[in-house]
Amino acid sequence: MTLPIQPVILCGGAGTRLWPESRGTRAKQFLPLTGPASLFQQTLGRTPAGDAFAPPMILCGDAHVDTVRAQLGAQQAALLVEPMPRNTAAAIALAVARADADTLLLVMPSDHVIADVAAFHAAIARGAELARQDWLVTFGIAPDRPDTGFGYIASGAALAGDDGNAGFQVARFVEKPPRADAEAMLAAGGYSWNAGIFLFRAGRMRDAMLTHCRAIFEAADRAVAAGRHDGDALYADAAAFAEAPSDSIDYAVMEKDDRVAVVPVAMGWSDLGSWQAVHALAPPDDAGNVTAGDVFAHDSRGNLIRAGGKRVSLVGMQDVAVIVDGDDILVMPLARCQDVRAAAKARED
């Protein structure tokens, strides 16, 4: 019998790219940005507990425990609480240290959008075949534009599965490229965006970490062993976890290991990394405006307006974002969304 896959949902961090709504305890993943459910709740819904998936393990910081529990509702889950941020390698090491060696762990960020869940599940099935053969599997997003904001994965030799090609050996990882390189990779084919979604046998990742980033895994292992239980949550020991170097799983393991596979998939994926992306994914009105709350838009087209409990009126505006959150009001051209960090830094410092 095939055991269910254990989802591991990473809920750390708040980020500033969707300021002012996303900040502090109201992190991006807990906001309803593309519908009534938060991004975290949408992530939970993609891997429902049952025959295919075990109840999820959720990694979060102490500040987000109450929000996680509230948004879980009656859904069963295990919480693993990080005492401080130490990047994705240490977070994943906590999950690995807590899991049985033969358990397949599906690691997912909590703040992504996946429109085609059936395609995602088909990719997971292909990836599981490879993970059971002790490949460390990453899922690559089929690129539809030469985007310079993502890392890329180059596919190498094809890897066979039960029903044909299950994926490819990773030839190399590519850092966020300049425009010309991104255009060349798109034209050449065989490249995917790196989405930060992984699938592997826990014992295989444990061995890989002991080989490539021993200090990270051993600190996480000690933090789990000395952790404090509180109902459904295990609070990792702060003194032990603080000794873990801060590094991403890509740098710490995936780029160093010689048995890494990629499963490319087109599944309507977005990391929702800007207000422009929120505008692009939400259903617009006849004038191309995307609105939330009490909004009046006259002779205005292509705007994103989130009223945040206020009454917002636009006249003669085009392609701008207006985001209201409490006393903070952000107004900018949608094309300048990457500059939101400047406002966030000035207001939050």
Image (spheres, helix red, strand yellow):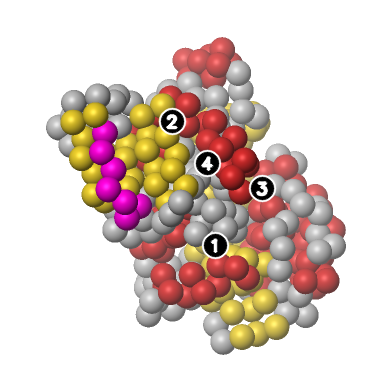
> What is the CA distance from the residue labelled 2 to the residue labelled 4?
13 Å
Q: Secondary structure at mark 4?
A: loop
> What is the CA distance from the residue labelled 1 to the residue labelled 2?
24 Å
| Along the line of sight, the residue nearer the viewer: 13 or 20 | 20
Check disc 3 and give the amino acid type.
Asp
**Residue 298 percent across, percent down from the top left:** 18, 31
**Residue 46 percent across, percent down from the top left:** 37, 59
| Along the line of sight, the residue nearer the viewer: 114 or 5 | 114
Q: Which residue is mark 2?
A: 332
> What is the CA distance from the residue labelled 4 to the residue labelled 3?
15 Å
| Along the line of sight, the residue nearer the viewer: 129 or 148 | 148
Mark 1 Cα shell of 10 Å, populated few (<14), some (14-19), many (≥20): some
User: Residue 17 has which mark?
Assistant: 4
Label 1 or label 2, whichever lies nearer to me, is 2
Check disc 4 and give the amino acid type.
Arg
Check disc 1 and give the amino acid type.
Thr
**Is 312 inside the magenta-drawn segment?**
yes
Whether tag 1 and tag 2 are in contact, CB under 8 A, the answer is no
- Give the mark nearest the N terminus, 4 or 3: 4
- Where are the magenta residues, as a range? 308-314
User: Residue 25 has which mark?
Assistant: 1
